[in-house]
Image (cartoon, rainbow, N blue to C red):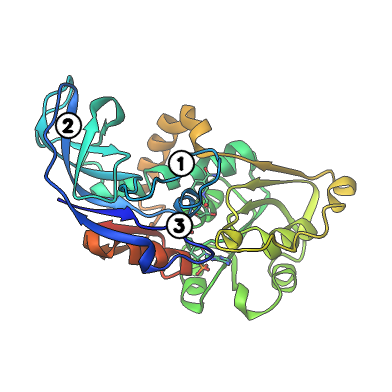
């Protein structure tokens, strides 16, 4: 069994030296435990925050111990009610080839309904984040105009497509490369731009001259400032993530225009997907239907091998992924 440990805490951008590949024995299960051979693991932006030794909504990763996070794999040993060898399960012990999972922390998934990687992407946590943030937190209604940043990523690409399927009048996305912008147009976004091509404020104004009702924020900083400027009266923003500042060593300068919240009666609301579990059933049903009918597309960028998991994580932070970044084990 091979696993990745946190060797040191990054200052600013992480580097390969912050991680260590460690060989261990394949674990032996006790009562109520399962040994899972992981097939896919997720690398996610929130993991960067867990590498800092600060109090947050999830505890920090420990030094010299395996990292963890979403993973899917098959049960190879262990006895627990409702599970049998060969079952495919979703659980929270990624960053290792073999996981010793408490059965209460594992959920069986149906490998016939979708490829198992989908339970870490379109049908998983990032898909639910998009669904809950757009429809519950920002309460998007048909006929509204939507702007989403980080639009070619796992969450953002779902936000834009769900908005269209739920009747948005106009969907605008921003992303970090010409290829991503092209992909967004193919996914049905009405307009898309590369935020490297000029000030976000100017590009957003050109893409949504009448303004937007809803902003789904994955990025923060200059994007959030531009969105506040573009939001219409009674606009709502779902504050999902601020990836532009996760590796920053200084607090961000923007947004500088918060006074606009008053006159425009704007609502900016942060949220965590973990608080929206009650939507999971409805989300899976609706998303599975869209997938079956070919009305939604999802991208996955797959890196092979546990030894390359740190590289996949760093690549995701740098924007090398289209859709969900995953590691195949
Ligand atoms: P993505 O698949 O979107 O991957 C991250 C992307 O961020 C990269 O591909 C890159 O794309 C973009 N990015 C990196 N740096 C910058 C920057 N400085 N400015 C603009 N874009 C940048 O990740 P996820 O879909 O998993 O997550 C998206 C956001 O949602 C993150 O902020 C994350 O923290 C948040 N999140 C929040 C949850 C919650 O419960 N609140 C749950 C899940 C995710 P590009 O090439 O376009 O720059």
Q: Could you classify mark 3 by the number of other residues whose Cα lies within 10 Å: few (under 14), some (14-19), or many (20 or more)?
A: some
Of the two numbered discs 2 and 1 on the same chain, state the one appearing first in sequence. Answer: 2
Q: Quadrant of residue 255?
A: bottom right
Residue in the image at 23% along x and 50% along y: 96
* Helix, strand or loop under label 2: strand
Give the side of residue 65 with respect to residue 204, left or right. left
Give the side of residue 247 with respect to residue 317, left or right. right
Residue sticking out furthest to the right: 263
- Residue 264's x, y, as percent? 85, 48
- Residue 197's x, y, as percent? 63, 80
Is 16 rendered above or below residue 251?
below
* Helix, strand or loop under label 1: helix
Residue sticking out furthest to the top: 81
Mark 1 vs mark 3: in front:
3
Q: Could you classify mark 2 by the number of other residues whose Cα lies within 10 Å: few (under 14), some (14-19), or many (20 or more)?
A: many
Residue 211: tell me if it is visible.
Answer: yes
Looking at the picture, tell me which residue is in the foreground, 1 or 237: 1
Mark 2 vs mark 3: in front:
3
Q: Mark 2 points at which residue?
A: 34
Q: Could you classify mark 1 by the number of other residues whose Cα lies within 10 Å: few (under 14), some (14-19), or many (20 or more)?
A: many
Residue 300: tell me if it is visible.
Answer: no
Residue in the image at 43% along x and 32% along y: 280
Q: In which quadrant will I find the C terminus?
A: bottom left
Q: Name the residue under label 3.
A: 9
Q: Name the residue under label 1.
A: 128
Is 48 rendered above or below residue 278?
below
Q: Are marks 2 and 3 in contact (CB under 8 Å)?
A: no
Residue behind label 1 places its C-beta within 8 angstroms of ligand 1: no
Q: Distance between the residues labelled 2 and 3?
A: 31 Å
């Amino acid at each position: 069994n091979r696993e990745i440990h946190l060797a040191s805490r990054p200052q600013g951008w992480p580097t390969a030296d912050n991680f260590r590949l460690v060989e261990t024995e394949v674990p032996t299960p006790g009562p109520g435990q399962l040994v899972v051979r992981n097939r896919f693991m997720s690398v996610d932006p929130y993991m960067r925050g867990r590498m800092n030794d600060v109090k947050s909504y999830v505890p920090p990763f420990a030094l010299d111990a395996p990292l963890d996070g979403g993973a899917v794999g098959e049960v190879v040993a262990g006895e627990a009610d409702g599970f049998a060898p060969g079952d495919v399960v979703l659980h929270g012990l990624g960053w290792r080839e073999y996981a010793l999972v408490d059965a209460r922390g594992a959920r069986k998934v149906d490998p016939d309904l979708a490829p198992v990687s989908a339970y870490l992407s379109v049908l998983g946590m990032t898909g639910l984040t998009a669904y809950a943030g757009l429809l519950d937190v920002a309460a998007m209604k048909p006929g509204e105009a939507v702007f989403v940043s980080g639009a070619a990523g796992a969450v953002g690409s779902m936000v834009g497509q769900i908005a269209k399927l739920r009747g948005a009048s106009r969907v605008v996305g921003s992303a970090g490369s010409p290829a991503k912008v092209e992909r967004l147009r193919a996914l049905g976004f009405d307009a898309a731009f590369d935020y490297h091509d000029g000030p976000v404020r100017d590009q957003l104004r050109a893409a949504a001259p009448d303004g937007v009702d809803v902003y789904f924020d994955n990025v923060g900083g200059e994007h959030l400032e531009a969105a506040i400027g573009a939001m219409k009266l009674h606009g709502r923003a779902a504050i999902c993530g601020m990836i532009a500042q996760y590796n920053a060593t200084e607090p961000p300068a923007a947004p500088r225009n918060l006074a606009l919240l008053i006159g425009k009666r704007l609502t900016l609301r942060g949220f965590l997907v973990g608080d929206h579990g009650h939507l999971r059933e409805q989300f899976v049903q609706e998303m599975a239907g869209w997938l079956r009918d070919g009305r939604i597309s999802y991208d996955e960028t797959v890196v092979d091998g546990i030894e390359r998991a740190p590289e996949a994580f760093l690549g995701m932070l740098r924007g090398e992924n289209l859709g969900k970044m995953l590691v195949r084990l």
